[in-house]
Image: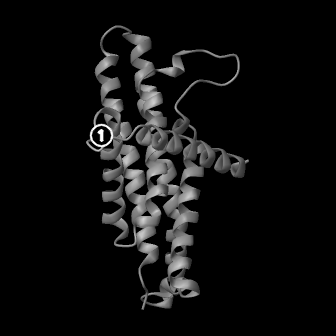
């Protein structure tokens, strides 16, 4: 079940990333304007985040960090722009994809796979030496830390998006005219912040795993 969600999230993430690239490189201009200028700004922003957190070897990880950021950003905004929960369906509900704990867990597990891969690729089997640093007594705590990383990533994103949507739904049902609008704008802001936090932490974990352990 969770494997299906991981594969689904990965495919949808790559689709969003590919679509953004297609829009950005379509009829490129020497002096960027409009959409090209916007997507170049987004790319520079993602590169800066990756370089700051990962270091000089950030290049190969820009697509992954960018994919995570764009998927979460688009997913969050799809739920913040419209209160989908007020639309009743016979089965299930309409909501932001990140409002589902399975989606956020899949994103967190993809991040875990990424930073294990980064550490093993850079340091080989010596990567596992970090679990006994600075002393072997800390082995259980260091192992536990790697389990808590995906938990914190998934529940932080899920909890914030779910809370935002629930607040909007309650306000729409109680005062459907004016009051929900400021809350929806606040939801757009927090949705973007949550995407940035997730991408920054993912890059930080990758950078941490690529550091040498002596």
Q: Residue at x 57, y 57 (%)?
A: 110
Which is nearer the eye, 156 or 82? 82
Furthest residue in direction right, as rendered: 1
Q: Quadrant of residue 8?
A: top right
| Place of residue 112 in the rendered image (x, y in percent of width and height, measured from the top left) | 55, 63
Residue 157 horizontal/vertical position (percent): 46, 45
The reply to whether residue 13 is visible in this rendering is: yes
As drawn, 189 above or below 181: below
Q: Is residue 42 above or below residue 94?
A: below
Q: Is residue 160 visible?
A: no
Q: Under tag 1, what secondary structure?
A: helix
Q: Is residue 6 left or right of residue 178?
A: right
Neighbourhood count class around disc 1 (C-alpha, 10 Å): few under 14, some 14–19, many 20 upward: some
Number of numbered callouts drawn: 1
Check the image and report above or below for 25 versus 106.
above
Residue carrying label 1: 37
Residue most extreme to the left: 31
Name the one closer to the observer, 150 or 45: 45
Depth check, front residue: 58 or 92? 58
Question: What's the residue at 54%, 64% (across, down)?
Answer: 114
- Decide if residue 162 is on the left or right side of residue 200: right
**Residue shown at 52%/72% (left/top)?**
118
Q: x, y (%) of residue 126? A: 54, 88
- State the quadrant of the C terminus: bottom left
- Residue beneath the point at 36% across and 42% down: 39
Rendered image coloring scheme? one colour
Q: Nearer the viewer, residue 144 or 105?
A: 105
Residue 143 x, y percent position in the rendering: 54, 75
Residue farthest toward the top in the current orientation of the protein: 177
């Amino acid at each position: 079940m969770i494997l299906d969600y991981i594969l689904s999230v990965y495919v949808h993430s790559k689709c969003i990333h590919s679509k953004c690239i297609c829009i950005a490189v379509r009829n490129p201009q020497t002096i960027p304007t409009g959409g090209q200028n916007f997507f170049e700004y987004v790319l520079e922003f993602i590169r800066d985040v990756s370089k700051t957190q990962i270091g000089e070897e950030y290049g190969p990880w820009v697509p992954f960090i960018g994919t995570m950021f764009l998927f979460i950003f688009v997913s969050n905004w799809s739920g913040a722009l419209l209160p989908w929960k007020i639309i009743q369906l016979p089965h299930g509900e309409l909501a932001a994809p990140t409002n589902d704990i399975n989606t956020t867990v899949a994103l967190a597990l993809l991040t875990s796979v990424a930073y294990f891969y980064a550490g093993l690729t850079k340091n080989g089997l010596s990567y596992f030496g970090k679990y006994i640093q600075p002393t072997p007594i800390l082995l259980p705590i260091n192992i536990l830390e790697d389990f808590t990383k995906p938990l914190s990533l998934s529940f932080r994103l899920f909890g914030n998006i779910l809370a935002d949507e629930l607040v909007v739904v309650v306000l729409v049902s109680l005062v459907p005219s004016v009051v929900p609008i400021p809350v929806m704008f606040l939801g757009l802001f927090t949705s973007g912040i949550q995407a940035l936090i997730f991408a920054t932490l993912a890059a930080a974990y990758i950078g941490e795993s690529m550091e040498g352990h002596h």
